[in-house]
Each structure stands twice: as structure tokens, then as C-alpha cells.
Amino acid sequence: MLTRLHTNKRREKKILIRRIKRTEETIALSPEVVFTTSASNMAGGTISIRRAFELLQGIPKEQLESSGVSGLFEEVAAINQKLEVMQKGYRSFFGRQERALGDLLPKIVKEYYEMDGYRVEEADEHIDKEFKIDLIAEKNNEIRAIQVKKGTVSSQEIREICEKAPAYFKQKISNQRVKIIEIIAQHFPNDYLQIRDEFMKRQNEVTLNYKDFHQITQRLPKYRYLNVS
């Protein structure tokens, strides 16, 4: 009788170890970037702490004591009082820097397009108000009318830009050029693609593009610390 021998070979498992060398880059920030970033972050931190304080106020003191966090409640209350004093003292500074952030964003976008070889001009106050255009970027046969929004752009704002910006092209730009409306923001509404499709169906002379501000800071990492939400 023949018997078949079974041999169990133990497979050796190999573990690959990849060494990752982490490097920290040092970026020189301009004073205006430091000021606007600090103002946004401090304002956001104040709001967050106050919300936490309001939530803690809704919990009975006995439950806080039984949970061992009654001391935390007192510490947060003290911090909140200090923040109120600071906010009163620096309110004008925060306000100025928030406005400065709004002025800085188009300059950052201008720098971004200039890196790609565009000739970019900031729109004057008349063009901004009448046509909803912050920047005009030109390259070869292409021209872009760019609107930069801080934080979130609403559906109503997109529709208003789509209504007014094409009038600039009709008045100022010859038909032979490629015309693009570009809206740059941190957040877009749920129906932003639907609005674009509706706009493109109504006409075929002007293209509507969207760009997330994150795409800008990827190319310009020195501005990634800005809080534009």
C-alpha cells in the first residue's frame, strides 16, 4: 500500500520596512499673512471656547462634580472672561485684519496665475461693482474674468456673477478670444454644478469654471496657514 507523504512547508513572511525621512520646510511669512492668520485663528478659538462654555453651563453642577470635571468648568469660565477682555481690547485689530484678508486673497490668486504665465490685472472698483470681477487674467488667446470669494460662495452669488460678468466680455473683448469666468472660493453650494450646466446651455460664448482655494495654496504653500473659511 502506497502512502502519500504530506510535507508542510512553513512560508516565511517578510516584512518590508520603509524608512521615511521627514523634512520640515521653513517658510518666511510676510507680516500681513501673519496678522490676518492670527486674527482669524484667535477669533475662531474664542468662538469655540465660548460654545464649549455654553454647553457646560447646561449640565447640572452635581453631574459635573460626579464626573470629576467641576474644576474644568471653573477654568473654562475664567478663560472665557479673559477672552472677553482681550476681544474688547483688540476688536478693532481683528476687524482690520479680517478686512485685510479679504484684500489679500485676490493678490494671492494673482500670484498663482502669474506663475502659469498669465498677465493679471486687478479690476478697478467700477469693474468690480458692475461686472463682479476681481481679476482679469490674459494668456495667448485666452482671457479669464476671476471672482475671489472668502469662505463660501452662495448659489445666488454664482448666478449674479454669471449674469454680470459676461457683459464685460461683450463690451470690452473681441469675439475671437476664449472667454472664461472663474469663481474661486473655499466652499461651494450643493447646486454649483447645476448652475454651471444651466449657464452653459443658455449660451456658448463663455465658459464657467470653479476652483477651490486649496488648489491655490498647494501651489503657493506659504499661504496655506490662512484661514479663509
Image (cartoon, rainbow, N blue to C red):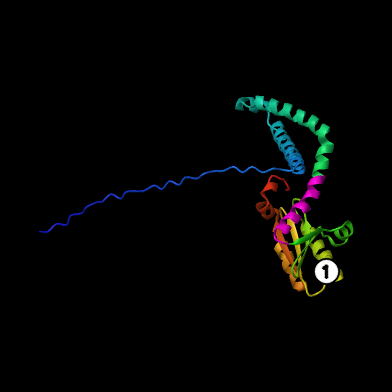
- From what the image shows, is residue 49 above or below residue 220? above
Residue 68: which quarter of the image?
A: top right
Q: Residue at x 61, y 27 (%)?
A: 67
Decide which of 202, 148 is in the foreground and name it: 148
- Answer yes or no: is residue 191 visible: no
| Magenta run includes residue 110 | yes
Q: Position of residue 148 (x, y in %)?
A: 77, 55
Q: Position of residue 20 (x, y in %)?
A: 50, 45
Q: Which quarter of the rendering shows the N terminus?
A: bottom left
Q: Residue at x 56, y 43 (%)?
A: 23
According to the picture, the residue beneath numbered tag 1 turns out to be 169
Decide which of 47, 95 is in the foreground and name it: 95
At label 1, counting other C-alpha atoms closer than 10 Å, the crowd grade (few under 14, some 14-19, many 20 or more) is many
Query: Which secondary structure is most common in the magenta stretch?
Result: helix
Give the extent of the magenta segment.
Answer: 99-117
Q: Position of residue 46 (x, y in %)?
A: 74, 36
Q: Residue at x 78, y 53 (%)?
A: 106
| Magenta run includes residue 191 | no
Residue farthest along the right direction in this orientation: 126
Q: Position of residue 89 (x, y in %)?
A: 83, 32
Which amino acid type corresponds to the residue marked 1 in the rendered image? Phe
Residue 141: which quarter of the image?
A: bottom right
Decide which of 72, 200 is in the foreground and name it: 200
- Answer yes or no: is residue 12 visible: yes
Instruction: Give the mark count.
Output: 1
